């Protein structure tokens, strides 16, 4: 039986979180002299003299409407990097526990584990970039507290099969984190629709990709009420600033714009894949379900340097295991993509 109280680090069970007077406040006070704010206003040109809502209730209500996930099952973080970090802190005892990752994958899982002195169990993807479910099972011990499943995966770009992800989540005894930063570009339904089936499932999503708000720093974690409570307990009190909450609410009213941008990016991705396929220095373009493509190119390091000199920065993944000789390229505007293709033709 999955028991979150057995999984959480023991010293956190009875931790009293930070609380402000306004957490309990439910009357209709008009004068707030509880939080040592500046009563006169703000030195900036906005009214930012008050602390923001620590639980971002308005933003969560709106996210709830759009995702059909109740607000009590939503956590908002300073980017999705924040919930990644908080999950490691909540569940992994330093020097004793570990996370399990399936490289090549997103780099922050390892960094967060490293910061917290937590072990890292690596079960590489198969050469076709699919998860090795059996090997994950074999590598899992009672100390393996978190499993990170990045799908669509960064940097390989592919979405894992539903059946494989389901087996991974179902069979993992700890918390299974499905990182869906790129889900909007892959066309399938989000795993948030299946939260109630899996008490150990955390789904991560972000405003940084499809919503086009990487500069805002806003990420989302969806999970059981118990897991969300744990994240709330250990987060910094005002982790989402007032401007981020205001801008997120505005963006969430613009769902149609987000969808139009996603459609355009997917179209540009096809264009880039096609054009890359025609270049003689490109040996292989891996299929992508994301807003980037991974391409194996002849003399990747030299091509990377050449592009940097031409003022074009891509991601050099040529030394990453299973991605040897590959560059990762974010889908740009048509103009940017043409500039990239033009530069590659000139080599
Ligand atoms: N997950 C994945 C798979 C990513 O690629 C990234 C960013 N590149 C993130 C999470 C973090 O996104 P953010 O903190 O901007 O929400």
Image: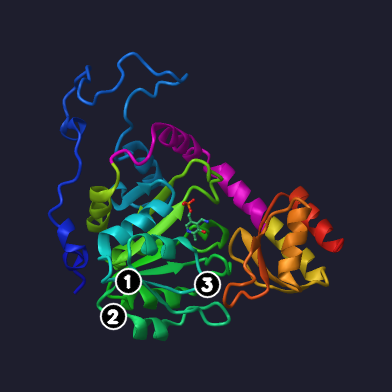
Residue 344 seen in the figure: yes
Position of the N terminus, as image quadrant, is bottom left
Q: Determine the secondary structure under disc 1.
A: strand
The span from disc 1 to disc 3 (Cα, nearest Å) is: 18 Å
The span from disc 3 to disc 2 (Cα, nearest Å) is: 21 Å
Q: Determine the secondary structure under disc 3.
A: loop
Position of the C terminus, as image quadrant, is bottom right
Task: Identify residue for label 1.
Answer: 98
Overall secondary structure of the magenta stretch? Answer: helix
Marks 1 and 3 close (CB-CB < 8 Å): no
Task: Identify residue for label 2.
Answer: 141
Residue range highlighted in magenta: 237-266
Crowd band around label 2 with a 10 angstrom C-alpha radius: few (<14), some (14–19), many (20+): some
Is 265 within the magenta? yes
Left of 60 or right of it: where is 128? Answer: right
Marks 2 and 1 close (CB-CB < 8 Å): yes
Marks 3 and 2 close (CB-CB < 8 Å): no
Give residue 104's mark: 3
């Amino acid at each position: 039986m999955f028991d979150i109280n057995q999984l959480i680090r023991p010293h956190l069970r009875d931790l009293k979180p930070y609380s402000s007077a306004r957490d309990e406040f439910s009357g209709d006070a008009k004068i707030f002299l509880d939080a040592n704010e500046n009563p006169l206003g703000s030195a900036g040109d906005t009214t930012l003299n008050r602390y923001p809502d620590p639980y971002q209730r308005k933003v969560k209500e709106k996210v709830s409407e759009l995702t059909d996930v109740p607000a009590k099952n939503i956590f908002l973080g300073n980017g999705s990097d924040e919930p990644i970090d908080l999950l490691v802190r909540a569940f992994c005892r330093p020097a004793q526990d570990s996370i399990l990752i399936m490289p090549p994958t997103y780099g922050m899982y390892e960094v967060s584990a490293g910061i917290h002195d937590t072990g890292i169990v690596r079960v590489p993807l198969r050469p076709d970039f699919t998860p090795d479910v059996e090997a994950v099972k074999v590598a899992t011990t009672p100390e393996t507290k978190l499993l990170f499943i990045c799908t669509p995966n960064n940097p390989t770009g592919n979405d894992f099969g539903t059946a494989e992800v389901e087996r991974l989540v179902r069979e993992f005894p700890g918390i299974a984190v499905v990182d869906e930063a790129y889900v909007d570009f892959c066309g399938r339904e989000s795993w948030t629709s299946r939260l109630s089936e899996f008490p150990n499932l955390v789904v991560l999503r972000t405003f940084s990709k499809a919503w086009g708000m990487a500069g805002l720093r806003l990420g989302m974690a969806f999970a059981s009420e118990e897991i969300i409570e744990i994240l709330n307990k250990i987060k910094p009190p005002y982790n989402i600033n007032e401007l981020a909450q205001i801008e997120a609410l505005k963006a969430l009213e613009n769902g149609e714009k987000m969808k139009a941008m996603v459609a355009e990016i997917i179209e540009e991705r096809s264009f880039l894949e096609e054009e890359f396929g025609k270049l003689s220095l490109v040996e292989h373009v891996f299929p992508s379900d994301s807003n980037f493509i991974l391409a194996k190119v002849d003399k990747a390091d030299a091509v990377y340097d050449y592009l940097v000199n031409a003022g074009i920065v891509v991601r050099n993944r040529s030394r990453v295991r299973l991605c040897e000789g590959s560059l990762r390229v974010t889908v740009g505007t048509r103009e940017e993509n043409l500039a990239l293709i033009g530069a590659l033709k000139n080599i």
